[in-house]
Structures are given as structure tokens and as C-alpha cells.
Amino acid sequence: MNQKLTIALTKGRILKETLPLLRAAGLSPVEDIDMSRKLLFETEHPDIRLVILRGSDVPTYVRHGAADLGVVGKDMLLEFGADGLYEPLDLGIARCRLMTAGFPDREPVQGRIRVASKFVHVAQSHYASRGVQAEIIKLYGAMELAPLMDLADEIVDVVDTGNTLRANGMAPLEHIADISTRLIVNKAAMRTRHGVIEGAIAAISDAIGSGETR
Ligand code: PRP
């Protein structure tokens, strides 16, 4: 049983924006994550280590207690649920929006609308809440391709600048949720390892407020 506190980080754009926060919080990895194929990293804090995961796996690791804390997009929490997790901090990074999107001049769909997304639960409940019958088609990436290839009428995806949609002739349609990156904590660990977890949360919280992250 490893006694170090483990923080699960989301790789990619979120990781890039998380590292300056960790640096300001005194939790920098001791080696360059980008230069390594390793997935587990010690930090300058002797009791805290980092693990690098896909965003969709971060809530799972934290829910099961394999990691104590996690840094993950709100989109993943909406899709995979937040049972067993506290969400004490909005890190305010990697901000974007979950939207439906499609061709702005498309003819109205007769019958069930086909929607491609990796956010199947979010999509399901969005269309259900509007009383729209939808067939949700699960994809793992490049959602924008689905309407172009007539696999789907619309997509549900995160939109930041809107450039990807525009480049493919599409536009955002309906707003589902504002997204940013959150710090999550395993509820049981919050009780059993309260001191060190509270310390880490406070250090990250101060780092958000300090502006020393650029
Ligand atoms: C996301 C999303 C869009 C794009 C939106 O993909 O799926 O493709 O970013 O950003 P924009 O509005 O600024 O163009 P990302 O690059 O995060 O990779 P992913 O497909 O792995 O999610």
C-alpha cells in the first residue's frame, strides 16, 4: 500500500494548463513529463505523486481510491458522474462549452435525430429534456466528421474557439453547459487523509489566486 498522496492529472491541454498551477503550489513533478513515457511521477513534495491519465479515466481512478485527488474537465464529471467524489475547487482552466452542433442550414430532421458524441449520457439527457427523440451514436474522437459523412445529423462536443466546427462547415447550435477544469477528491480519502489532502487543496487554491501561474 503506497502511503503517498496521489493526484491523477488529465493529459493533453488540461495538463499543460495544470503544470503552472502545480508549480505555484509547490507540487511540480521532479522530471519533465513531456520528455518521458512514464505515467507516474514524484513531485518536489515528498508525500505527493502524480499519475497521468486520459480525462475519461480520472473520475474512475479517484472514485475507486486508486488516486486520492484528480484534475479533470467538468465535461467528464457530467458524463461519468460524480458519485463518491467531492469537487472542492474550480481551477478555472481549459474553459470551453458543451454544445450541440451541426450544419446551420440543415433541413429539419423527420423522426429521430441522429447525434454523434463521446458524451452519450450528456447527449441523451439533453435531447430528452427538450422532448426530442434522439439516437445517440458513440464515437471516440473527430466528432465533426460524423455530419460530414452523414453518420449523424448533429454532434455533442466541447467547443472552445469554434475553429474546428467552422473549418468543417458547421456551427454551434444549443448550449448544454459551461466547462472548466475541476479538482476532485475521493470522499473516503478526504476523511482518512484529511490533513494532507486539505494541505494540497489549500496550496492549489492559493496558486489559483496568486497569479503566479504564467
Ligand atoms: C476538442 C473538441 C473539438 C475541439 C474544439 O478536441 O473535440 O474537436 O477541441 O476546439 P475549438 O472550438 O477551439 O476548435 P481536442 O483537441 O480537445 O481533442 P479530442 O478530440 O481528443 O477531444
Image (cartoon, rainbow, N blue to C red):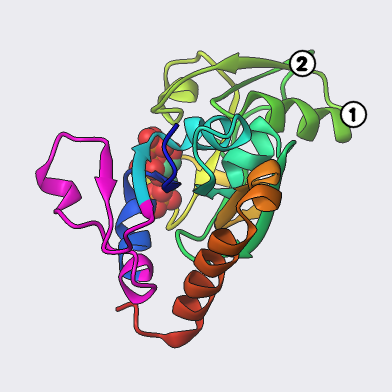
**Label 2, ligand 1: CB separation under 8 Å:** no
Q: Which mark is residue 208?
A: none
x and y percentages locating residue 16 in the rendered image? 30, 57
32 inside magenta stretch = yes
Q: Quadrant of the N terminus?
A: top left
Q: Amino acid at mark 2?
A: Gln
Q: Is residue 88 left or right of residue 126?
A: left
**Numbered marks: total:** 2
Q: Nearer the viewer, residue 171 or 40?
A: 40
User: Range of the magenta residues?
Assistant: 21-48
SS class, disc 2: loop
For the stretch drawn in magenta, what is the main secondary structure?
Answer: loop
What is the CA distance from the residue labelled 1 to the residue labelled 2?
A: 14 Å
Nearest the viewer among 48 and 176 is 48
The answer to whether residue 29 is left or right of residue 147 is left
Where does ligand 1 appear, by image quarter? top left
Query: Residue 84, can we see it?
Result: yes
Question: Residue at point 35% right, 76% down?
Answer: 24
Q: Is residue 168 left or right of residue 197?
A: left
Visible residue check, residue 176: no
> Against 203, is 185 above or below?
above
Vertical side of 10 occupied by 201: above or below? below
- Closer to the camera in the image, 9 or 25: 25
**Closer to the camera, 164 or 17?**
17
Q: Mark 1 falls on what kind of element?
A: loop
Kindly identify which numbered label has been placed on residue 110: 2
The mark that comes first in sequence, 1 or 2, is 2
Residue 154's x, y, as percent?
Answer: 60, 28
